[in-house]
Image (tube, rainbow, N blue to C red):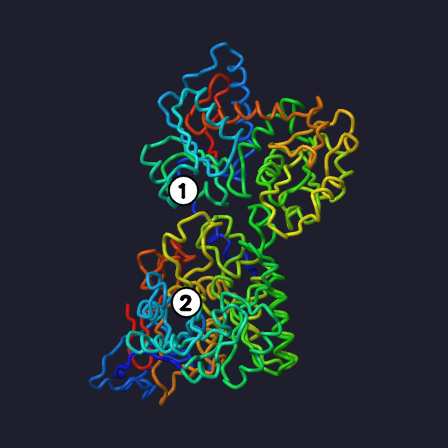
Amino acid sequence: MTDLRVMRDDLLPPPPTERRHLVSVADLSRDDIERLLGTARNFSRSLEREMKKLPTLRGRLVINVFYESSTRTSSSFELAAKRLSADTMSIKASGSAVDKGESLKDTALTLGAYDPDVIVIRHPQIGAAHFVARVTNAHVVNAGDGKHQHPTQALLDLYTLQEEFGRLDGLHVAIVGDVLHSRVARSLIQALDRVGARVTLVGPPTLLPRGVEAMGCETSTDIDTIGAADVVYVLRMQQERMQEGANYVPSLREYTARWGVTPERLRAGQKVMHPGPMNRGVEIDPRVADASDALIESQVRAGLVTRMAVLYDLLTTGPVGVKAAQLTEVA
Amino acid sequence: MLYSKAEPGENLIVRGARVLDPRAKVDAVVDVRVDGGMIAEIGSRLDPNSHRVVEAEGLTLAPAFVDPHVHLRTPGREDEETIASGTQAAAAGGYCAMLAMPNTDPIVDSAAVLGSLIETAAAEGEIPVGFFAAITKGQDGAELTEMAELADSGAVGFSDDGRPVTAPGLMRRALQYGAVTDRPLAVHCEEPTLSRSGQMHEGAVSAELGFTGYPSVAESLMVERDLSLAAYESRPVHLLHLSARESVEAVRAARAAGVRATAEVTPHHLCLTDEAVRSLDSNLKMNPPLRSTDDRAALVEGLRDGTIQAIATDHAPHARHEKEVPFEAAPFGVTGLETAFASLYTHLVESGLVKLELLLERMSAGPALVFGLPVPRIAAGEPANLVLLDTRAGWRVQADGFRSRSANSWLLGQRLTGKVRMTVAAGRTVFES
């Protein structure tokens, strides 16, 4: 039969506009990722100084718009902008015009009227960051859109791994839990694939998306497979995303018994990560969370410098300090 | 069963076109003369008399199209489409007849609502339009509508389109009782506990984008159920907008076993796959969703071998502000009346997947026969239902170029080949460009 791919060219999304955004890890090349991690490392040195504020983004405006609750992502974006001397505004959906039924388009246009340089957005619906990028002139950073993407989380996780292991290429990461509902997992699988790491997804069959192997990972329903990994990345059991009666797992009790990450299921010295917030005693045993092999606090610290690097990368053409990286498109 | 403005037929001569009527096995460069809206003569160098002459050298004259599945949004959402705007859009798309679905507000489930639609169509319908009535009251899937009265009042068929008739017992009753009306049942096949919250086809693309998947088995399971019931009751059934390989295979097998099953497919399912959803454009969100390359190949094959008899646009207008939202928040549905021929000519005929003759048949005689409507033909003595096509003209689809009140097209910005130059419906020129 005639090749049906014949019209694939017509299906490609319109070419990206000149303005750079960070909407999805899928838009990043390996060079982009390495450049961003390098910039983050430089910022981590500058944060060791007594005077932690850099003048780099003075006069720039960064608006954070959060339609979902968040502690670490919203606070670290705000602090990242402040450490770079940018002006910041943070808007939460509750208490704003969103409560009065304002559409995302109108909120974006309203905020866009202040000529922000960057809009950081978190929203419960897939495609929200992409949508805002289309209707405003700001650089858009996706801080989480539904179950789709959370690219800065993936970058900070890579940064944490790089700092811990000194390399990313060839690392083996087991991602455990509710992959189906996890934007963190989707972003991280793509990011790890880009830098040459190996990924195994482990969880109940109902929470591993059909077709996910095409992203460049293996899957297993057997918790014992985590033993072979260098790092065990534990996903939050997203109870708020579990529809009533959906029967993904019969009970949390059974989930914990079968897939909870406990000291007994880990090798000595095996590193553990978690994007937070944790459900201690559900997906992660408190003894694991508090052990010295857990990199969870390093992840939070990495969040600040990584987000500084993202803001910096989007808004400047030359790097601070080190090698003059060529300006490649981020997105 | 079809209603439109009553206006006298025209006198005209279409001169020098390639006249192509696959069913009548006509393919020749000849003139066609229309007297008072009826095709009077086909031949070379016809005498124009005082007829209006349409010079059509280099163009193709074919039987006009029939769309068995559109949403006219009237009553209830006249901001999205009216009978006037929807039939004008259809005229611009080359159609001489169309059938409208009953999922309006209120739903077309009583003779009163149907009667008011027929009255409006008779006053403002640019081309003949027929109306489906609902299978169940309020399309709630609980109680049958008064099917006999609705048929007597002019319903062209019955459908709960947009929703399945979920309970198998009720679907069986609809098939049994529907026999007294002699009108077809057109069913939307979706098993709701499998499609629940699904935003796009379940597969590698949904896994990557994070969307809840709407698996192909949610359709094919219901297709198989309805084919089994139709076989058991020895009743015909029409399956709306097929999207999955398994559905096509089930229909093929049932037809081979003697079940009187017919099926339709949309231009977007014939042209696109779920890969297109990566753009997160809300104009690529529809129910059933765009499926895999393999599913698309099966639909094309089904169209070719006659398992699928009809191309239906499932023209589903939506207000601009309702589609200008993140993909996940957008309603299902895209428009298609004004782009159907060009999109299919570009993606199927130009790429060599389907012959022009087959495309014309599946857009005209195919759907007409499924619903027992008069088959548009180019022959002396037939009413003039003609479309004049320019298969060399390229054009770009633009949001401000539609006659429809809505512009939620999956083709915005795309360049297509094939343009409708003129449409004659029921003996009257309803579109010219």
Is residue A67 at least partly visible in the picture?
yes
- Of residues A129 and B43, the one drawn nearer to the viewer in this rendering: A129
Please tell me in which quadrant of the rendered image residue B337 appears. Answer: bottom left
Q: Report x, y in % for residue A273.
A: 66, 30
> Label 1: how many residues lie within 10 Å, few (<14), some (14-19) or many (20+)?
few
Viewer-proximal residue, B111 or B49? B111
B44 is higher (above) or lower (below) than B265: below
In the image, what residue occupies the spot 71% across and 49% down? Answer: A250
Q: What element carries label 1?
A: helix
- Please report, as a chain letter, where disc 2 is located: B
* Residue A160 locus on image (x, y percent): 61, 25
Mark 2 residue crowding within 10 angstroms, few (<14) / some (14–19) / many (20+): some
Q: Name the residue under label 1.
A: A99
Instruction: Tell me the kind of residue under disc 1.
Output: Asp
Circle 1 or circle 2, nearest the eye: 1
Horizontal side, residue A126 vs residue A203: left or right: left
The answer to which image quadrant residue B404 occupies is bottom left
Question: Total number of numbered labels?
Answer: 2
Q: Residue B104 carries which label?
A: 2
Residue at image position (38%, 80%) is B2
User: Which kind of residue does numbered mark 2 sit on?
Assistant: Thr
Residue A102 location, x and y as percent?
Answer: 37, 44
